[in-house]
Amino acid sequence: GAGVSQSPSNKVTEKGKDVELRCDPISGHTALYWYRQSLGQGLEFLIYFQGNSAPDKSGLPSDRFSAERTGGSVSTLTIQRTQQEDSAVYLCASSFPGQQYEQYFGPGTRLTVT
Amino acid sequence: AQSVSQHNHHVILSEAASLELGCNYSYGGTVNLFWYVQYPGQHLQLLLKYFSGDPLVKGIKGFEAEFIKSKFSFNLRKPSVQWSDTAEYFCAVKRNTGRRALTFGSGTRLQVQP
């Protein structure tokens, strides 16, 4: 079946511009996660959605970052007034709820801020 | 704060050599443990996972990992590597309370020379 999809695959933007990154989770997965992978570093948790519960935003690095999930499916990560340090690969993952379920990752969006 | 350490950042092996990649975590409670792999140009995918039971878990492609609770470790092993194992390997931990997202190590880049 279809996996997690993300768009765009690559995004180059100028410093100060806003960007939106999209994630389409696997159908039926109610849990959705955003991570960031910076060059030479591991994956850093950003935000987590589970069903209709309030999202866990504890990983967002600043108030320039926000995310929403509409209808319990598609999610959009928005970065306002982008900075060069925002350059990274942004990964989305989804899973069934519950501890025992693994997360499935999308291909990521490579964001470059010039 | 919870952290995951992967001490080997870059490992170079010849084909048929044995592999062991270290992973240690710092969290005193119950955890679920994962190894993910990212082949060049591909998504992150799950290699193996530990939730409970036998601390020696077997994954895909001949990989295995052993959970040693007293050492807070979950090292990845493979008795004989192949050129196709060239990839980046990430250890990840998920607590069974609180945040549901994964905490990742910084990754180990494995290069297998033919």
Image (spheres, coloured by chain):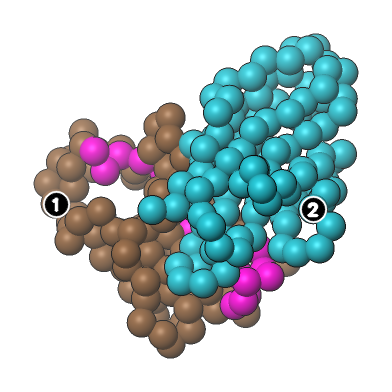
Chain colours: A brown, B cyan
Q: Amino acid at mark 2?
A: Pro
The residue lying at 25 percent from left, 54 percent from top is A61
Count of residue discs: 2
Q: Which quadrant does the C terminus of chain B fall into?
A: top right
The residue lying at 73 percent from left, 57 percent from top is B50
Residue bearing the label numbered 1:
A81
On residue B55, the disc is 2
Q: Tell whether A114 sits left or right of A46.
A: left
Q: Amino acid at mark 1?
A: Arg
* Disc number lying in front (1 or 2): 2
Disc 1 to disc 2, how far (Cα)? 47 Å
The residue lying at 53 percent from left, 57 percent from top is B28
Q: Please provide percent x and percent y for residue B19.
A: 77, 26
CA neighbours of label 2 inside 10 A, class few (<14), some (14 to 19), many (20+): some
Q: Which residues are magenta?
A: A85-102
Mark 1, secondary structure of its residue:
loop
Residue A79 appearing in the image: no
In the image, residue A98 lies in the stretch drawn in magenta: yes
